[in-house]
Image (cartoon, helix red, strand yellow):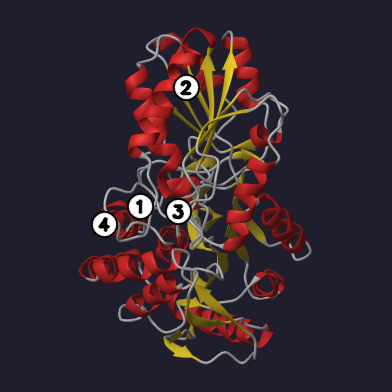
Amino acid sequence: MSELRNFINGEYVEAKSDGGFDLIDPATEGVYGTSPVSGREDVDAAFQAAAAAFESWGETTPGERQLALFRIADAMEARADEFANVESKDTGKPRASLVQDEILLSVDQIRFFAGEARHLSGMASAEYMKDHTSQLRREPIGVIGQVTPWNYPLNMAVWKFAPAIAAGNTTVLKPSDTTPSSTLLLAEVAAEFLPKGVLNVITGDRTTGAAMIEHKTPQMVSITGSVRAGMEVARAAASDLKRVHLELGGKAPVIVFDDADIALAVEGIATAGYFNAGQDCTAATRVLVQAGIHDEFVAALAAYARENAKTGAPDADGILFGPVNNANQLAQVTGFIDRLPDNATIELGGHRQGSTGYFHEATIVSGLLQSDEAVQREIFGPVITVQKFTDEAQALEWANGVQYGLSSSVWTENHGRAMRFAKRLDFGCVWINTHIPLVAEMPHGGFKHSGYGKDLSSYGFEDYTRVKHVMSYIGG
């Protein structure tokens, strides 16, 4: 049994609040630790530490910040196996692939933002008015409050803290209540290279997050989570005019035209749909297939998934994904299946797997209508839905016909068609003949109810900066 503590001002500290919760292994449903529910005193202590640290960290040079981030990345890489073990315990993810798929990816992203620290963009200094020289300053915002989800605990913590700190800010970061361990380990590793108070991690539940958003110290709040949570954060932040950065849910359309390479599409969509048990806002779980190949595609997808999309314990051989993260999420997934309308057909799966652990079979559902709940709402589980469309107009209408706007993909050999859809799809990312790869150099973020602001890339870095115009009279 491990008893977690908050990490504030460079060290582990006991929470001032009395509340706590059990940490549940999603693969066994066994309790393996406890974590505090931080209260307002804990939140205040963390923000006080961050505010004090900003006085000096905000004055550091880009080179100093870059070096610190490079050292953190190197230390993480050296302890990659330790991070993977912790992450697998919290999430149930397959242990064999975690280092390559997520831990080293996080290391690479920290290194990217280390580079961004020394790449401050803006217009050239010049005389835009006679006898006056204008220049731009790109400055840190100040203290940032950040909240991350349970589907990619470490990776999302990196997406939050790395650009914020690279830009000269200090942070208070709250991981999900079910997956706090890897974020606390990250803070411990980073503390060797950062001044005290630059990165603070507190654990807790929804009330802890609300206390962070309502606190007067942070000048910006950033959350990756549900649409509901994003709306609550935006409302609370508005009362104090805090900046808000939101990466919320998704319902990615995956449009497969009748000229697509079916084998390529099936493999790519199954992998991108079932990876991480479908618990990904960009997952390829809403597939639209042109009528001419619909039946062939569904049969091929079911056959491929039956053979390759297996679930099991984190240390089991030959599995693609582990359990969903928690009991509530399993209930949400099974609830969607239980409520399927009469027009739906379950082509594969459809059930919880086993009686212990939060495992759910890889599932395929066909015959759904555009208005059906499983098409319109985010399931966030290993369930792929398939709809049959007739032409481009209908595919585009259905693709855009949801409240989300995070990601999408188009599968076709017709270059002109691919470019038309890249233009008209109302999503922050459009993949062509692939789905789900991300690179640190390109932005990630959505439209509509998927939120606003960008993660990754120089745009993600700039979201954690402010721009100041300085104009000087130089005489005539």
Report the mark closest to the observer, 2 or 4: 2
The residue that disc 1 covers is: 119
- Taking the view exactly as shown, the residue that stands out farthest to the front is 355
4 or 1: tag closer to the N-terminus: 4
The residue that disc 3 covers is: 461
Is 193 located above or below residue 274 in the figure? below
Q: CA distance from mark 2 to mark 1?
A: 47 Å
- Taking the view exactly as shown, the residue that stands out farthest to the left is 78
The residue that disc 2 covers is: 298
3 or 1: tag closer to the N-terminus: 1
Q: Which corner quadrant of the image does residue 15 belong to?
A: bottom right
Q: Is residue 71 visible?
A: no
In this rendered view, identify the residue nearer to me: 379 or 54.
379
The residue that disc 4 covers is: 96
Specify the amino acid type for callout 1.
His
Within 10 Å of the Cα at label 3, are there few (<14), some (14-19), or many (20+) other Cα atoms?
many
Report the mark closest to the observer, 2 or 3: 2
The location of residue 27, given as percent across then percent down, is 44, 63
| Residue 246 disc label | none
Within 10 Å of the Cα at label 1, are there few (<14), some (14-19), or many (20+) other Cα atoms?
few
Residue plotted at (62% across, 71% down) = 218
Residues tagged 2 and 3 counted as in contact (Cβ below 8 A):
no
